Image (cartoon, helix red, strand yellow):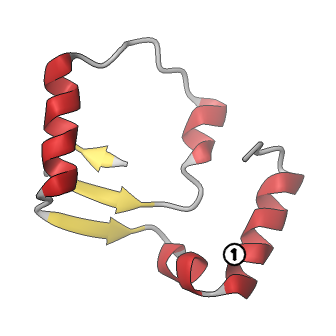
Amino acid sequence: MVDLKRRVFVVEILLDSFYKWMEFPNSPSEDDIDTVREILQHPENVGYGPLAEKYMLNPKVKSDFDKMKKEAGYNY
């Protein structure tokens, strides 16, 4: 997730919940796309959602979360 105002991005393991529960009716402008690329290349900071770092580094944590997400109907 990219925060355009703070120029940071967040690594979140349950990001798919945004896709499951929210609509995204607006297409991004070319300026939005350029801004996001710039932030990803040169972020002010990077944040991790709860357990995101453990999810990426610990196979047991990843397996448990993936099982939970599948049972909740997340299709990825």
Q: Where is residue 27 in the image (x, y as percent from the top left)?
A: 36, 14
> In the picture provided, is 24 more to the left or to the right than 32?
right
Closer to the camera in the image, 30 or 3: 30
At x 55% / y 39%, what residue is drawn? 18
Callout 1 secondary element: helix
- In the rendered image, the residue lying farthest to the right is 71
- Choose top left, top right, bottom left or bottom right for residue 42: bottom left
At x 83% / y 44%, what residue is drawn? 73
At x 83% / y 50%, what residue is drawn? 72
Up the image or down, 13 lies above or below 58; here it is above
Crowding at dot 1, Cα within 10 Å, few <14 / some 14-19 / many 20+, comes out as some
- Choose top left, top right, bottom left or bottom right for residue 19: top right
At x 16% / y 55%, what residue is drawn? 41
> In the picture provided, is 16 more to the left or to the right than 24?
right
Q: Position of residue 49 (x, y in %)?
A: 45, 67
Q: Name the residue under label 1.
A: 62
Q: Where is residue 15 in the image (x, y as percent from the top left)?
A: 54, 50
